[in-house]
Image (cartoon, rainbow, N blue to C red):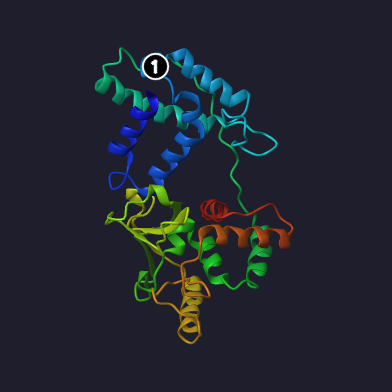
Amino acid sequence: QFKDAFMDWLRLYKSPPTRKPSTYASYLDIYHTHFAPAFDEMLLYQISPDVIQEYYQKKQLNGARMDGRNGGLSPALPILSPKTIRNHHMILKDFFTYAQSKYKLPCNPTLSTTRPEVVAKEMRVLSPSEMQIFMEEVMKETQRIAILTDLFVGFRVGELLALEIADLDLERQTLRINKNLIRVKTEALSLDNPNIRILNYDPKKKTHLIVQSTPKTKTSNREIAISDGLCELLIRHLYTLAHSSWPNPDNLLFPSRAGTHIDPKSFEIRLNAISKRCEIKKVNPHALRHTLATRL
């Protein structure tokens, strides 16, 4: 059956430490939400190109989840985007390539299917006037230096929030990226994975924050120069940290008031709140990254 073969494949080829916990968690989520209701009870040889094509059609037309519940772009539009469907296709294609060899299937049924065309959406970028309003409003925030740093260097939010004081080199005037903070489902974690640090592990919790020893991609390990203005802000920030009552046992560059890592979701919520106060279109962490690239 599909469910046994697919889960064996996930366990052998897509689980940590071969893959990052975040990648494995996304595979598990797609399986439980989408693939399982559609294919679980079917034998592999029964899954023809027509069966998979019908799956893609349903995802575009009749709701994102086979059980009728919403799981798509929004409550008002419960369908999957063309890009998400193509991601599903790549996973199924990879699995059936494995199944061809393992179970001697006559063909890979995904190869004869068609997928919707992906149209790149316009990225959110702050205009120069929006940037000015945004920066003025940011100064009211407790984590203002973290937000301004993200706007001026364009780090991914997990890279920013994983920074430690040692990653700031004042002599060279650089910031070094070598790790990433993300939240993943507990079922995707491997306790003996040497490449991650699980924060406050509790097996009863559904998700955990983890620090991965590498950023999102292999090429994301980097050291970047920072401007004189940002360097001055960070020097003042370090002085404030050193003379504050905030605990900081992990020597984080941007700790929370409790001295812990800031949850990426909490960071995004603060950006949304600032956007509303500025009365501008919603700003998320990725918008700051795109804004830097556009201004450059």
- Crowding at dot 1, Cα within 10 Å, few <14 / some 14-19 / many 20+, comes out as many
Quadrant of the rendered structure where residue 196 is? bottom left
Q: Position of residue 100 (x, y in %)?
A: 29, 19
Q: Please identify the residue farthest to the right as the structure is shown.
A: 279
Quadrant of the rendered structure where residue 213 is? bottom left
In the image, what residue occupies the spot 44% across and 51% down? Answer: 184
Q: Position of residue 147 (x, y in %)?
A: 55, 65
Reading the image, the residue beneath label 1 is: 109
Given residues 191 and 171, the one toward you in this image is: 191
Q: How many marks?
A: 1
Q: Is residue 14 visible?
A: yes
* Quadrant (top left/top right/bottom left/bottom right) for the N terminus: top left
Is 88 situated left or right of 70 in this image?
left
Give the answer, above or below, for where 183 lies relative to 39.
below
Given residues 93 and 199, the one toward you in this image is: 199
Q: Position of residue 210 (x, y in %)?
A: 40, 58
Give the answer, above or below, for where 164 lies relative to 4.
below
The amino acid marked with disc number 1 is Pro
Give the answer, above or below, for where 206 lies relative to 59.
below
In the image, what residue occupies the spot 40% across and 30% down? Answer: 91
Residue at disc 1, secondary structure: helix
In the image, what residue occupies the spot 42% across and 61% down? Answer: 202
Is 118 situated left or right of 168 in this image?
right
Q: Please identify the residue farthest to the bottom as the structure is shown.
A: 243
Q: Position of residue 80 (x, y in %)?
A: 57, 32
Q: Is residue 155 visible?
A: no
In the image, what residue occupies the spot 58% across and 22% down? Answer: 58
Quadrant of the rendered structure where residue 41 is? top left
